[in-house]
Amino acid sequence: MTFADSKSRFSSRVADYVRYRPHYPTALIELLRVQCRLSPEHVIADIGSGTGILSELFLKNGNAVFGVEPNQEMRTAGEECLVGYPRFTSVNASAEATTLTNSSVDFVTAGQAFHWFDPVAAYREFSRILRQDGWIAILWNDRNTVSSDFAKAYEHLLIHYGTDYHRVKDSYPRPENIQSFFRHNNFLTRVIPNELVFDLDGLKGRMRSSSYLPQQDHETFAPMMAALDKLFAEHQHNGRIAMEYSTVTYLGQMNPDRTSITLGNVPS
């Protein structure tokens, strides 16, 4: 499933995206070290890098990172957030046409972005820019919808007020989607627990950052935020509420015959 507005739909939500979206756990770096022999010398192409949330994790590991982002507002925010990292290069391009040179990167990553790509064109492009034995890491901060009464109620609120929530949610990658993308089933899946803790303002910002919910000029925005106020009051503890995630990671290669995936003991 592709979206005609995939390169523009977050333009008006950048500030909230920067402040309130979940980051990726540092255990992800250890996972990649164990399974893919990630080292600081490897070059990363972070596709759909947005505001730089995933890119920063690799930059802190010492990697050179190309942040490929087609949305101007998101890309500018990423450049501002990562200005202190000299090994970061911002690229105005897309998954389907990165403008990177042939065989120039060791890892292609996509954090919370894979469902916006044209899979056929992206496969062709990733094959072109990856070095031999390079890896692809497709990552997802998947919000838990049933772990608590709050999680269930928040999910119900999204369903009730969402503009195209089901369509976006149904596009999130599943193992069968990843198998179809790689064109083989020799890929590895790992899940790492993750969590964000919000006060009321933070929870409102998290909601505003979602592309499938109405914005401030929409007639349902005010009742939606009133419902969120009520939800927070019912479930908060000491003025805070936890939103639980699982960081789902798919690791694979274009040609699994080059280097087989060895299943090892990894952090959970």
Image: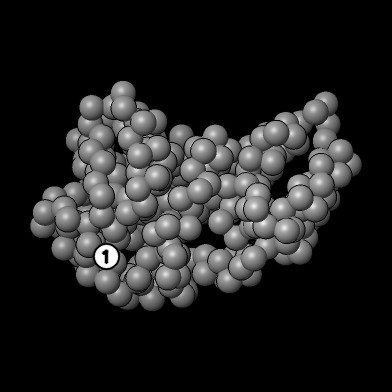
66, above or below 79, in the image: below
Pick the front one: 210 or 236: 210
Task: Say what secondary structure mark 1 lies in.
Answer: loop
Residue under the image location 42 percent in, 57 percent down: 8
| Residue 20 occupies quadrant | top right
Left or right of residue 166: residue 26: left
- x and y, in percent, of residue 2 in the image: 43, 72
Q: Looking at the image, which residue is at 61% across and 68% down?
A: 164
* Residue that protrudes farthest toward the left in the picture: 102
Which color scheme does this rendered protein use?
one colour
Left or right: 45 in relation to 219 = left
Residue drawn at the location 32% of the way across and 54% of the way down? 70
Q: Which residue is mark 1?
A: 96
Would residue 133 be visible to someone looking at this image? no
Q: Is residue 177 above or below residue 20?
A: below
| Image position, residue 62 (x, y; %) | 27, 29
Name the residue at the top extreme.
84
Q: Is residue 159 left or right of residue 22?
A: right
Pinpoint residue 222: horizontal percent, then vertical percent: 76, 50
Q: How many marks?
A: 1
Residue sitting at x 69%, y 41%:
204
Q: Quadrant of the C terminus?
A: top right
Q: Left or right: 18 with respect to 153?
A: left
The reply to whether residue 125 is in sight is yes
